Amino acid sequence: MTGFAEKTSAEVVAASFAGTPDPRLKRIVTSLVEHLHAFVKDIEPTEAEWQRAVGFLTATGRMCDETRQEFVLLSDVLGVSMLVDAINHRKPAGATETTVLGPFHLVDSPPRELGADISLDHNGEPCVFAGRVSSSDGTPLPGALVDVWQANGAGFYDVQQPGVQPERNLRGLFTTDEDGRFWLRTVVPRYYPIPDDGPVGKLLAATGRHPNRPAHIHVIAGAEGHVPVTTHVFVEGSPYLDSDTVFGVKETLVRPVTTVDDPGRAARFGVGNPFRLLEFDVVLAEVPR
Ligand code: BEZ
Ligand code: FE
């Protein structure tokens, strides 16, 4: 290979990785070099701009610790998190679609009884959240685990307001009954901004983008012999459904909050009549054999 020049840069640098023993790593670094060099040739940055880009990445790294992951947030607002999600979860038709996990999930979600009220601060409009977990062929899945977490009616997660919200507010790990059903009491979540006090927030502001996500409840559902799903149910009519800053909305995941006037159902859910209801059935694909 001849020496490095503007025209040959990608080839020369890619060739320097030719001896990479791991074929997957070789493919990744080669493609990275090709795309990165094409990007730089496209924008032809000034040296000051390149320094600024390095400064941006440095600031992004400095904003990362156990509780804040600014690089994931960057991947989210660039649509890369949802692209990786789409590539890795090509579901059979009918199975519940996936979306981003987000930074507010706790691995040790508190186990709760069906019907429990997960709103410990009662900040928001009371609402029942209910659904059924089934297999792609319609078979209900008893004993399925349904992990739920959400923001309150003011648009904050418990972990964002320690000392203000009770610990484990608006979180719960539920197990479906013999018909594959789950139900719980909660509040209607509000839309909220992603953490925007760091470099990613500055990028959004500089590019005229808002930092908001539409109102949603996070769900991870899993059952024996089935592929678990990490998803949300989005509240129909919420602001920002058409412009989620992390591109997480899928039409199949939007549901209305309805008003139900049915004393029998209200009694079964342990709420007064009439009541507000958000229903979300989950369909899990079977693990391919
Ligand atoms: C969330 O929905 O919790 C979330 C997702 C991506 C970035 C920030 C928050
Ligand atoms: Fe969220």
Image: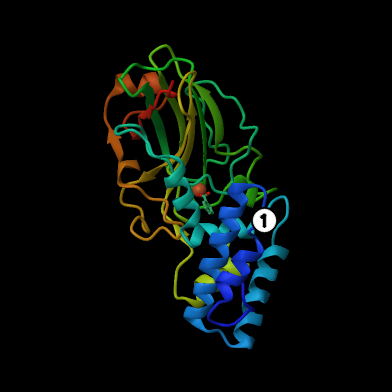
Q: Residue at point 47% right, 76% down?
A: 207
209 over 177 or under it: above or below: below
Disc 1 residue crowd, few under 14, some 14–19, many 20+, Cα 10 Å: few
User: Which amino acid, mark 1?
Assistant: Gly
Direction left: furthest residue: 261
Name the residue tied to disc 1.
19
Question: Which quadrant, please, contains the C terminus?
Answer: top left
Q: Is residue 125 above or below residue 240?
A: above
Residue 197 in sight in this render? no
Image point (62%, 77%), residue name: 2
Quarter location, residue 92: top left
Q: Is residue 246 left or right of residue 250?
A: right
As displayed, is residue 71 above or below residue 260? below
Position above or below: 244 against 209: above
Quarter the N terminus occupies: bottom right
Q: Position of residue 251 (x, y in %)?
A: 30, 46
Model colouring: rainbow
Find numbered disc 1 in the image and state the secondary structure of the residue it sits on.
loop
Q: Position of residue 197 (x, y in %)?
A: 62, 67
Q: Nearer the viewer, residue 203 or 272?
A: 203
> Does label 1 point to a residue whose CB lies under 8 Å from ligand 1?
no
Left or right: 96 as drawn, with respect to 84:
left
Residue 145 pos. (x, y %): 51, 24
> Which residue, as the protein is rendered here, is positioned at the far top?
178
Question: Which of the 4 quarters of the picture holds residue 140?
Answer: top left
Which residue is located at x 42 percent, y 24 percent?
288
Q: Residue furthest front?
A: 1
Please say whether residue 273 is visible from this viewpoint.
yes
Residue 124, position as x, y percentages in the image:
47, 45
